[in-house]
C-alpha cells in the first residue's frame, strides 16, 4: 500500500500539496503521529514519534510495531489499530507512559486513533496522534493534592478546636497519621511543670537562660527537633537521609546558638565532643522515611510530633507546609487543653475546699449529704451545700447552684456561701437573708451571673422549719407515715439578683420526718426533663418509705449524733463510679439508705454531665 491510497486530492497538484504537508508534519514539527495500514504496518511516522520509540523514522516504514517496540507496548498498539479498522470509529487512550531518551523521568502521553477513509469510504488506514500530557497530569495531581490538603487541614483544625484534653489531641494526631499512610504516629510532650527554655533563634536575655533539661529516653531526632525548633524530614533516599531542608548540606544539625549552652543531659555531655550534637536517628527497620515536627507554645517548646512511613518519599514544599500547619494547630490545642486541665483542677480544688467535710452534731437531728462532681470530661459546676449552727441554737441549711462551669462558677459559689453565712449570723430570718443577697448581687455581680438556692432554718427543739428559695427546685419531704411531697416557699421565685419581695414557708417536721434538698443535676439530664425527674424522685421516696428504708435503727447510738455525709472521691477521668459515694463506717441508716436509693434510681445508667448535690435532714425519734 502506498501513500496515494490515503490521499483524497482530485489532482496531481493536490497530491503534491498533501505530500508537502505530511512531510512538514513528519519532519521538524513537534507533532507525534503515525499512519498504519490494514496489515498493521507503518505507512508513515513523524520524527517526533520516532524519537519516542528510540528508532529512526525510516526503520519503522513497512514494519509492524511488534518488530520494533517492547512486547507489551507493541501488543497494545496493534490491538488498538485492529479495533479501529474493525469498527471504523475513533478511539482514545488517555494515559500511557513512555520514556524519551533525553528525559530522566517517564512521561505521560495521550493517544487518539482516527480511521482514515478511502474513496470507497472504507477504512484504508488508521492515524495515531500522540500528545505529551505530563504537565497537564502534574497540574491535575497538584490541584487534587492541594484540595485534599486544604480540606484535611480544615477538618483536623475543627477537630483540634474542640479538644479539651491531651488525649483528644493524641487521637487527632493518630487520625491524620492514618490518612497520610503513616506507619507510626505519636506526640511527645515535655513535662508541663518543668522549666521552659528558649529556642536558639528566639532572643532571650542572658540572665533568663535556664538549663535545658530534655527527657533522656527520647530518640535523638525528637530531641533535636525540640531543642532547635526545626522540622526534620528524614529518609533512606539521598535527598532525605542526608539533611533536613533548613540545614546546610554536611551539617546534620544546626550549631549551638549560644556558646555557653549547657548539655541536655549528663550522658549527652559526656558522650559528645565540644560543639557537637547527637545525629538524628535514621529510619528504623521497616521505616523508609520519617517526619519530626516541633510543637511551640507561648514562645517555648512543648514537645514534638513524629510520623514514620514504610515507603521512601520526598516531602515537597506543599507537604511541608501542610504538616507544619497541622503541627501548629496541635500546639495550640495542647496549650489550650493544658490550660483547661489546670483550670479544671483548680476549680475542683476550690470547690472541694469550700464544701464542708463534716456537718455539725446537733441532738435530735440527723444530717446526711452526697456530692458528686460532673463527668470527668465536663467542667466542674457551681453546686454547693452547707449546714451551720446559728447563735440562737437553730440550724441553717443551704443547697445552691451557681449557673456556669469552671473556675468562675466555683469562685462565685465561694462568694455567695461566704455572704450568706455573714447575713445569717446577722439576721437568720430567711426573708432577710435572701433580701440581703439580692442587694449584694445587684451591687457586685454582673448581669450574666445567675444563682439559685434554698435557705432554711430549723429549730431542733420544736421541729419548726422556715424555708425560702431563690429560683431553686423545691425540697422533698418524706413524713414518718410514708407520704412524700414537694414543698417550696410559695409562688414561683426568681434567682438572686432579680429583685422581688421574698417570702418564706413555715412548716413543722415531726419525729421521723425527712427533708431533702438537691440540685438540678440529680433530676435533669439529656434524656429526662425536670418534671419527669421530680415525678421519679417522688416515686423513689414513696417506694423507699413503704419498704421501711426511711426508718432509723438501733445502730445509730444516741439520737441526734449520726451524720455520715459523703463526697465522692473518685479520681478524675474515670467513669462507672458508684453514684452513692462512700458509705459511712457504721453502714447505712434510714436517712443514708434513702439518699443512696435516690441516687441509685435517678443516676444509674444515665449520661451525667452536671454536678449532683443532695442534702438530707431527719428529725430523730426520741429514745425508746
Image (tube, rainbow, N blue to C red):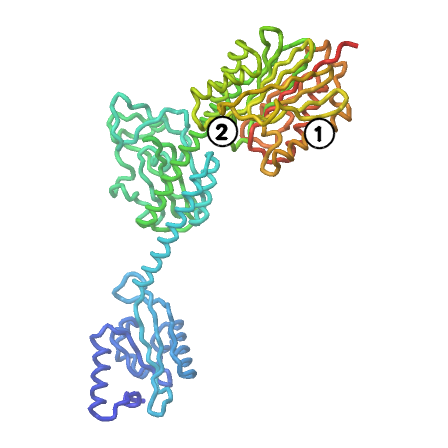
| Residue placed most toward the observer, 425 or 4 | 425
149 over 566 or under it: above or below: below
The total number of labels drawn is: 2
For the question of whether residue 270 can be seen, the reply is no
Spot occupied by residue 613 in the image (x, y as percentages of width and height): 59, 24
Identify the residue at horizontal 34%, vertical 31% (top origin): 298
**Relative to 211, does residue 362 appear above or below in the rendering?**
above
Label 2: how many residues lie within 10 Å, few (<14), some (14-19) or many (20+)? Answer: some
Report, in whole angstroms, how far the alpha carbon at label 2 lies from the one at label 1.
Answer: 29 Å
The numbered dot on residue 404 is 2
In x, y percent, where is residue 22? 24, 82
Give the secondary structure at mark 1. Answer: helix
Horizontal arrangement in the rendering, residue 485 relative to residue 348 (left or right): right
**Residue beneath the point at 21% across and 92% down:** 12
Residue ID for mark 1: 540
Whole-percent x, y for residue 295 in the image: 36, 36
Left or right, 102 with reference to 454? left
Amino acid at each position: 500500500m502506498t501513500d496515494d491510497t490515503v490521499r483524497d486530492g482530485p489532482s496531481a497538484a493536490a497530491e503534491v500539496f498533501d505530500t508537502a504537508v505530511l512531510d512538514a508534519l513528519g519532519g521538524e514539527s513537534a507533532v507525534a503521529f503515525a499512519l498504519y495500514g490494514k496489515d498493521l504496518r507503518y505507512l508513515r511516522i513523524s520524527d517526533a514519534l520516532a524519537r519516542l520509540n528510540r528508532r529512526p523514522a525510516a526503520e519503522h516504514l513497512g514494519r509492524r510495531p511488534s518488530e520494533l517496540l517492547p512486547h507489551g507496548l507493541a501488543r497494545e498498539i496493534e490491538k488498538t489499530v485492529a479495533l479501529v479498522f474493525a469498527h471504523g470509529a475513533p478511539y482514545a487512550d488517555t494515559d500511557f507512559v513512555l520514556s524519551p531518551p533525553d528525559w530522566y523521568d517517564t512521561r505521560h502521553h495521550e493517544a487518539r486513533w482516527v480511521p482514515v477513509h478511502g474513496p470507497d469510504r472504507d477504512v484504508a488506514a488508521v492515524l495515531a496522534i500522540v500528545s505529551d500530557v505530563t504537565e497537564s497530569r502534574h497540574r491535575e495531581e497538584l490541584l487534587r493534592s492541594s484540595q485534599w490538603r486544604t480540606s484535611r487541614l480544615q477538618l483536623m483544625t475543627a477537630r483540634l478546636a474542640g479538644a479539651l484534653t491531651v488525649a483528644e489531641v493524641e487521637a487527632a494526631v493518630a487520625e491524620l497519621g492514618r490518612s497520610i499512610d503513616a506507619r507510626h504516629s505519636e506526640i511527645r510532650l515535655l513535662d508541663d511543670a518543668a522549666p521552659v527554655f528558649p529556642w536558639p533563634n528566639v532572643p532571650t536575655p542572658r540572665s533568663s537562660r535556664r538549663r535545658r533539661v530534655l527527657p533522656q529516653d527520647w530518640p535523638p531526632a525528637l530531641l533535636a527537633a525540640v531543642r532547635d525548633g526545626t522540622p526534620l524530614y528524614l529518609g533512606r533516599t539521598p535527598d532525605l537521609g542526608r539533611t533536613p531542608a533548613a540545614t546546610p548540606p554536611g551539617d546534620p544539625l544546626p550549631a549551638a546558638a549560644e556558646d555557653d549552652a549547657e548539655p541536655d543531659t549528663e550522658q549527652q555531655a559526656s558522650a559528645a565532643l565540644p560543639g557537637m550534637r547527637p545525629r538524628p536517628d535514621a529510619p528504623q527497620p521497616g521505616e523508609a522515611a520519617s517526619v519530626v515536627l516541633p510543637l511551640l507554645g507561648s514562645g517555648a517548646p512543648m514537645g514534638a510530633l513524629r510520623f514514620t512511613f514504610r515507603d521512601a518519599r520526598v516531602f515537597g514544599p506543599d507537604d511541608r507546609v501542610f504538616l507544619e500547619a497541622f503541627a501548629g494547630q496541635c500546639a495550640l490545642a495542647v496549650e489550650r487543653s493544658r490550660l483547661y486541665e489546670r483550670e479544671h483542677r483548680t476549680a475542683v480544688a476550690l470547690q472541694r475546699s469550700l464544701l464542708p467535710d463534716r456537718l455539725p452534731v446537733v441532738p435530735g437531728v440527723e444530717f446526711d449529704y452526697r456530692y458528686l462532681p460532673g463527668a470527668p470530661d465536663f467542667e466542674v459546676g457551681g453546686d454547693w451545700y452547707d449546714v451551720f449552727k446559728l447563735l440562737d441554737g437553730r440550724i441553717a441549711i443551704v443547697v445552691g447552684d451557681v449557673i456556669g462551669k469552671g473556675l468562675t462558677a466555683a469562685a462565685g459559689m465561694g462568694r455567695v456561701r461566704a455572704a450568706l453565712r455573714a447575713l445569717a449570723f446577722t439576721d437568720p430570718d430567711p426573708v432577710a437573708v435572701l433580701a440581703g443577697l439580692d442587694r449584694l448581687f445587684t451591687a457586685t455581680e454582673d448581669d450574666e451571673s445567675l444563682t439559685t438556692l434554698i435557705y432554711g432554718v430549723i429549730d431542733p427543739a420544736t421541729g419548726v422549719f422556715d424555708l425560702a428559695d431563690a429560683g431553686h427546685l423545691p425540697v422533698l419531704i418524706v413524713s414518718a407515715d410514708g407520704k412524700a411531697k414537694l414543698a417550696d416557699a410559695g409562688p414561683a421565685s426568681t434567682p438572686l439578683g432579680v429583685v422581688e419581695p421574698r417570702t418564706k414557708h413555715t412548716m413543722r417536721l415531726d419525729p421521723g420526718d425527712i427533708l431533702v434538698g438537691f440540685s438540678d443535676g440529680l433530676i435533669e439530664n439529656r434524656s429526662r426533663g425536670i418534671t419527669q425527674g421530680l415525678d421519679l424522685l417522688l416515686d423513689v421516696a414513696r417506694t423507699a418509705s413503704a419498704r421501711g428504708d426511711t426508718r432509723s435503727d438501733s445502730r445509730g447510738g444516741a439520737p441526734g449524733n449520726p451524720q455520715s455525709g459523703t463526697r465522692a472521691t473518685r479520681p478524675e477521668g474515670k467513669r462507672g463510679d458508684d453514684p452513692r459515694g462512700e458509705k459511712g463506717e457504721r453502714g447505712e441508716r434510714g436517712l443514708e439508705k434513702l439518699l443512696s436509693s435516690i441516687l441509685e434510681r435517678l443516676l444509674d445508667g444515665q449520661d451525667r454531665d452536671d454536678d449532683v448535690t443532695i442534702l438530707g435532714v431527719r428529725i430523730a425519734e426520741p429514745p425508746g
